[in-house]
Image: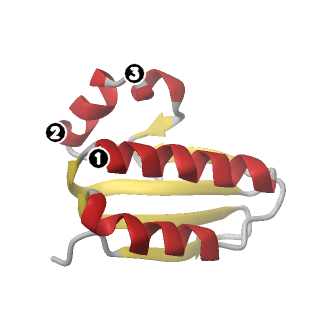
Amino acid sequence: MATGVAQSRPHGTRHRVLTLHGELDVAAATSVLKRLIELDLQPGQRLLLDLRDVQFIDSTGIRLLLQARAHAERAGAAFTVVAGPPAVMRVLRLVGLDDQLDVVREP
């Protein structure tokens, strides 16, 4: 699996989904940020950031989550994270993001 590969797909007209794979780290930052910026979010939509296939996240990955939330907010869109594996969610808990983000189990 390629590190940091991000795929975007529409999920109806109200949702945009960005699916991340592999490691969400400094090596993935540029490609993920590029994909994020390319998303044409509209007011009232929801950006779903799907972490189910992410095996590792570091501080750069945490920063990317915050950038994704800010990007959605600037567009007037909501932001939701689809929970990743236990190791990824442990990092989110350690930095307190599990309480600050809208985290769901399923998209």
Question: Which amino acid, by three-letter code, is at mark 2?
Answer: Ala
Give percent across and percent down for residue 46.
67, 54
Residue for point 77% across, 51% down: 74
Please state, as top left, top right, bottom left or bottom right, where the N terminus lies in the image: bottom left
| Quadrant of the image occupied by residue 24 | bottom left
| Quadrant of the image occupied by residue 94 | top left
Q: Give the labeled residue for mark 1.
A: 84
In this orientation, which residue lies closer to the viewer: 92 or 104? 92
Label 3 crowd bin: few (<14), some (14–19), many (20+), radius 10 Å: few
Q: Give the labeled residue for mark 2.
A: 87
Label 2 crowd bin: few (<14), some (14–19), many (20+), radius 10 Å: few
Disc 1 on helix, strand or loop?
loop
Mark before the other along the chain sequence, 2 or 3:
2
Question: How is colour applied across the structure in the image?
Answer: secondary structure
Q: Are marks 2 and 3 in contact (CB under 8 Å)?
A: no
Residue for point 61% across, 56% down: 47
Q: Along the horizontal axis of the image, is 43 left or right of 29?
A: right
Q: Is residue 8 above or below residue 33?
A: below
Marks 1 and 3, Cα distance to the nearest angstrom?
15 Å
Question: Which amino acid, by three-letter code, is at mark 3?
Answer: Gly
Residue for point 45% across, 52% down: 64
Give percent across and percent down for residue 18.
48, 66
Marks 1 and 2, Cα distance to the nearest angstrom?
8 Å
Give percent across and percent down for residue 6.
39, 73
Residue for point 21% across, 45% down: 85
Q: Give the labeled residue for mark 3.
A: 96
Q: Are marks 1 and 2 in contact (CB under 8 Å)?
A: yes
Mark before the other along the chain sequence, 1 or 3:
1
Disc 2 on helix, strand or loop?
helix
Label 1 crowd bin: few (<14), some (14–19), many (20+), radius 10 Å: many
Give percent across and percent down for residue 62.
38, 43
